[in-house]
Amino acid sequence: MNIVSGPASKELAKSVSDSIGCRNVSVVLKVFPDGESYVRLEGDVLGEDVVIIQTTCPSMQDSKLFQLAFMVDAAKRAGACKVTAIVPYLAYSRQDKLFLSGEGISAETVVNMLDAVGVDNLVTVNIHSEQVLSKFSLPVKSVSAISLLADYFVAKGYKGAYALAPDKGALYIVEEAQQVLGGGVGYLNKVRDLYTGQVMQSGEGLNVKGETVIIFDDIISTGGTIVGATKILKDLGVKHVFVACVHPLLIGDAAERMLDAGVEEIIGTDSVPGPYSKVSLSPLISKHLKGAI
Ligand code: R5P
């Protein structure tokens, strides 16, 4: 097996190659003055199974997607056998159904595009909604990083912390975290206006007074959901609030706003490399490639 280091996930790909002891193929990336990308694989992949690791997080997620497509095409043209794309953060995966008439389903468009260029298997991490996996045109697997995030807090001495989902859709996430943390579990009610984007949240029936609460979510984008949740938790008398997410997009001043609202620490994974990406996906991806999950 050959691991191709996509330009957006170089460090992660190197760590995975080292961990499973297989060859790492580096990639030359050039961006032309007009913004178009050029990629070239620096290694012979004729007759080899190839795994390309490339996240497609902001910023420039469209360019990262095209770079991925170009790397797949390059690998196939160079005679690679099976091509697996590991895309830790799969751009556009939140538009996974029709919310309003006249829309498209961007998540399916992205997968169709990767199918068309020759991806044989697609692996991602905590896709926004697992229900879409069966609708895709190629085999897509979503592996979960939640236990790695929970392990981080156990290592910091927060075994027994309460795992809170900011909405009911993330309940399965906190149930997974609870397996590691062993504390309480619950969720907030959240309704988003599809036209204005405005969010209404409430903590009805939640008994968390004096608790250490870790809010788990798949994605943090503007931080608005977490800021609202933190205010509710503070009103309910919680002792400490921490935040763990798989994909810390953290657009603009999202992190500062959450910290100002009273969050003590924010952690995410290197699906989105950055200052809060304290948990590496390398062990999870390595385990997957070894066939252990
Ligand atoms: C929504 O269902 C997701 O799980 C996140 O809660 C959402 O994307 C977070 O967005 P923001 O940080 O902008 O509130």
Image (spheres, helix red, strand yellow):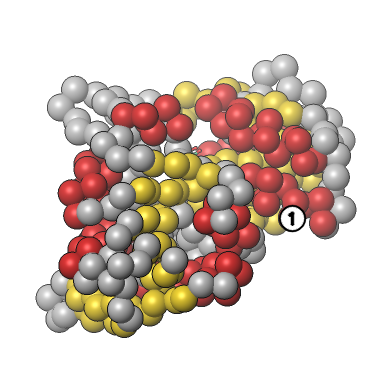
Residue 138 against residue 194 in the figure, above or below = below
The quadrant of the picture occupied by the N terminus is bottom left
Residue at the image position 16 percent from the left and 72 percent from the top: 36
Residue at the image position 67 percent from the left and 51 percent from the top: 149
Residue toward you, 138 or 274: 138
Q: Is residue 78 found left or right of 171 in the rendered image?
A: left
Residue 133 against residue 274 in the figure, above or below = above
Residue at the image position 60 percent from the left and 29 percent from the top: 172
Say which residue label 1 marks.
152
Viewer can see residue 232: no
Q: Residue furthest left?
A: 34
- The image quarter in which residue 69 lies: bottom left
Q: Residue 106 at x, y = what percent?
A: 25, 40
Q: Amino acid at mark 1?
A: Tyr
Viewer can see residue 251: yes
Q: Residue 164 at x, y = what percent?
A: 68, 34
Q: Residue 255 at x, y = what percent?
A: 56, 57
The quadrant of the picture occupied by the C terminus is top right
How many marks the image carries: the answer is 1
Q: Residue 204 at x, y = what percent?
A: 67, 18
Q: Helix or strand or loop: what does disc 1 sit on?
A: helix
Q: Residue furthest front?
A: 47
